[in-house]
Image (tube, rainbow, N blue to C red):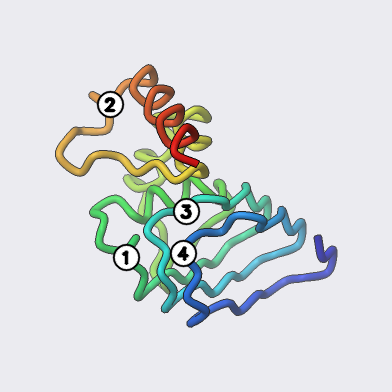
Amino acid sequence: VQPGLRALFLQGNFLAHLDHFEVQPQLRELHLQGNKLGSMRGMPPQPHLERLWVADNPLTSHPDFKAVCLMAVGSALIRIDDAGVEPHTREQALHLGPVAAAAVREGWLPDADTPWEDAGLLFLVEELQEITSRE
């Protein structure tokens, strides 16, 4: 933990996950663009993170990547890739609650073909268990 860290630039480092990334209590800006991130695995909630850059990562091909990012880092997030977080994206992220957010931080991504409201929390727990068993 770096108590005074307000901006962190990790772009272009071939990161495939964020395991071992710690909560940075004052972090406001995080640059992760140009890595190999397919999910937000390992990202703990960042209580003051407002701006996140994830462009040029496999994660951004997921249709709900902005909601996934919001679920991973928390509600302080207001901009992703220099675009504002839309209200419907915020609602989508909050809809599934803390179990889904924990699953996202373990690497879970919602199925693009299943509406989020149909996914169900039991499915999320099972998916999280499956992810954990692969480790």
> Which residue is painted at 53% across and 35% down in the image?
102
Indicate the secondary structure of the residue bearing disc 1.
helix
Q: Residue flagged by tag 4: what amino acid is it? A: Ala
Residue indicated by mark 4: 16
Q: Residue furthest left?
A: 113
Q: Residue furthest right?
A: 3
Gap in Å between the C-alphas at discs 1 and 4? 9 Å
Picture quadrant of residue 51: bottom right
Q: Nearer the viewer, residue 122 or 65?
A: 122
Q: Nearer the viewer, mark 4 or mark 3?
A: 4
> Which residue is painted at 55% across and 47% down in the image?
75
Gap in Å between the C-alphas at discs 4 and 2? 26 Å
Residue indicated by mark 1: 58
Question: Label 4 neighbourhood size at 10 Å, few (<14), some (14-19), many (20+)?
Answer: some
Question: Label 3 neighbourhood size at 10 Å, few (<14), some (14-19), many (20+)?
Answer: many
> Which residue is painted at 54% across and 74% down in the image?
31
Q: x, y percentage for residue 33? A: 45, 76
Residue indicated by mark 3: 40
Indicate the secondary structure of the residue bearing disc 4.
loop
Q: x, y percentage for residue 3? A: 84, 63
Q: x, y percentage for residue 72? A: 51, 47
Residue indicated by mark 2: 119
Q: Residue flagged by tag 3: what amino acid is it? A: Met
Q: Nearer the viewer, mark 1 or mark 4?
A: 4
Q: Earlier in the sequence, mark 3 or mark 1?
A: 3
Indicate the secondary structure of the residue bearing disc 2.
helix
Q: Nearer the viewer, mark 1 or mark 2?
A: 1
Indicate the secondary structure of the residue bearing disc 3.
loop
